[in-house]
Amino acid sequence: MTTSDAHRAIEAVWRIESAKVIAALTRMTGDVGMAEDLAQDALVAALERWPESGVPDNPGAWLTTTAKHRAIDTFRRSKLLDRKHEEVGRELDDRQQRSEHDLDAALDDPVGDDRLGLIFTTCHPVLSPEARVALTLRLLGGLTTDEIARAFLVPEATIAQRIVRAKRTLREARVPFAVPRGAELAARFASVLEVVYLVFNEGYSATAGDDWVRPALCDDALRLGRILVELVPSPGDPEVHGLVALMEIQASRLKARVGPGGEPILLLDQDRGRWDQLLVRRGLAALERAEQLAGALGPYALQGAIAACHARAHTAEETDWTRITALYDALAQLTQSPVVELNRAVAYSMAFGPAAGLEIANPLLSEPSLKSYHLLPSVRADFLAKLGRFAEAREELERAASLTRNTRERALLLERAKHLTPFKE
Amino acid sequence: MRFMIIVKATQDSETKFVPSDPKWEPIFAEMAKYHEELQRAGALLDYAGLQPSAKGWRIKYSGGKRTVIDGPFTEAKELVAGYTLIQVKSREEALEWTRRFPNPGLTDGEVEVRQLYELEDLS
């Protein structure tokens, strides 16, 4: 194996193991920044030794043990006798004694999984949503700063700074490394799910730039969601299954969402033969788990159930729109979200006609949060056109086009506006 | 990227495979542990063991004719005993995961790994 082959192999090991290593070190040191540095040191050591000695049988344990030794060295050398040192020092001394006895045994020790504690830290509410996303993708997703920057179309330096500031914020707020308990757990867990879905959504319908979808981001979010399902202790939270169901089914459509020229294809126009049935099956299974666990379905499970309705329809015409309206009724009650209300309007129009849809959509015109939301005029345009009110429809489409930042979506909207009226003005 | 890990059959898996036989226990345990690791990494898509070829059949195509041939089939190492589907970000990651796949055989064994075509590869 050449050195560069060996390095690529070690980078692959890093992708697989880094989150667990960083999590273990965060538990040990109480600081994510320090944990990441120590884990990186272990990676450097691996890059130096493994090309020669080969990748160990349990690389995760090797990396963790190496990083822990570095932690001990660092604390010993540190002249700062702060409270952390005293607290941790005792714990470290015990470990130091044990690992000095038998390094091989330490390497064979099963490495615990502290990733749940880590993700609660990276998604802590003291951080801004963008900071939570960047830090989670970096420490749990194993993405490089550059990859995160390219995914969100911001300069690499911006993400780098965002991550540095996030670590500092956590340190200064003395955020403890722990899985929340009791009343706090539900809210904190909702924040974790929110971050994962934020990432997924950015890949599923990119809010800016030229690409309509960024499948790699969806894969990253899906992977995080699947990991969460495993990490959450039994019986589990039905919403994590609901979120995974939603993502699996939406991801199943990724190949059908983009046309040959990169243009977006709406759900009802998609070639369903291009829907990935393996992902559909996984999504339906996840939804079933959510339904078995819960009494009433939560918001993610409801959205998953809606996605499942589409997935089960072999053609657009076979879609059970009535069931979808019922699911949206439940979702709207739970979330009080104007965007959900707009989707409810679409469902109603499909089930009961465009006038029914318009009736639900019109009050949203005075909704302040939707003032710049391009889908509101776009949806109203659809209803108006079906009611034969073409001039109003075209106005709405042009308004929608002016509001979207996504270049491909803008082109699609203007195209629809062009084909609306048969007569040129 | 998706990869299929194809577990090759052995003489033992073809003829001596009785699931309740205790000598298969350590392998089952290793396999379960490995697949749980894959699942905890969010990389596992699907997996299954296939029943021996004695219970299966082949369909041969020749000159427009189709013939059904009942198993068992003798070339054990050409037969498939099981598969695991994984989702990874790179070929190197697939290599690392498959490097850890437990030996599926009582003595010798083999797995073969192939990448799945994605839709864009085919269109």
Image: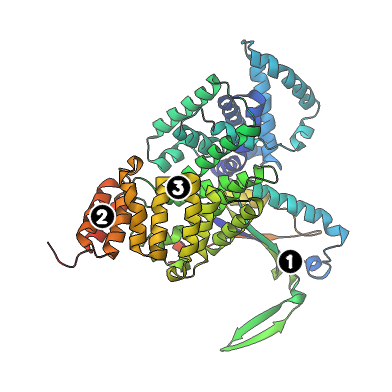
Cα distance in 3D space between marks 3 and 2: 23 Å
| Labelled disc at residue B52 | none
Decide which of A7, B52 is in the foreground and name it.
B52
Question: Which residue in the protein does label 1 denote?
Answer: B9
* Dot 2 amino acid type: Leu
Residue A366 relative to residue A132: left or right: left
Q: Residue at x 37, y 52 (%)?
A: A212
Label 1 and label 3: CA atoms lie apart by 42 Å
Chain of the residue under the numbered disc 1 shown in the image: B
Residue A199 visible (yes or no): no
Name the residue tied to disc 3: A201
- In the image, is residue A58 above or below residue A400? above
Confirm whether circles 3 and 2 share one chain: yes
Which numbered mark, 2 or 1, is in the foreground of this view? 2
Check whether the beta carbons of the residues at disc 3 and disc 2 lie within 8 A of each other.
no
Vertical position of residue A134 compared to residue A248: above or below? above
Name the image quarter holding residue A266. bottom left
For image coordinates 56% across by 54% down, the residue present is A245
Residue at disc 3, secondary structure: helix
Mark 3 belongs to chain: A
What is the CA distance from the residue labelled 2 to the residue labelled 1?
60 Å
List x then y, in percent, for residue A327: 50, 56
Quickly name the residue at label 2. Answer: A397
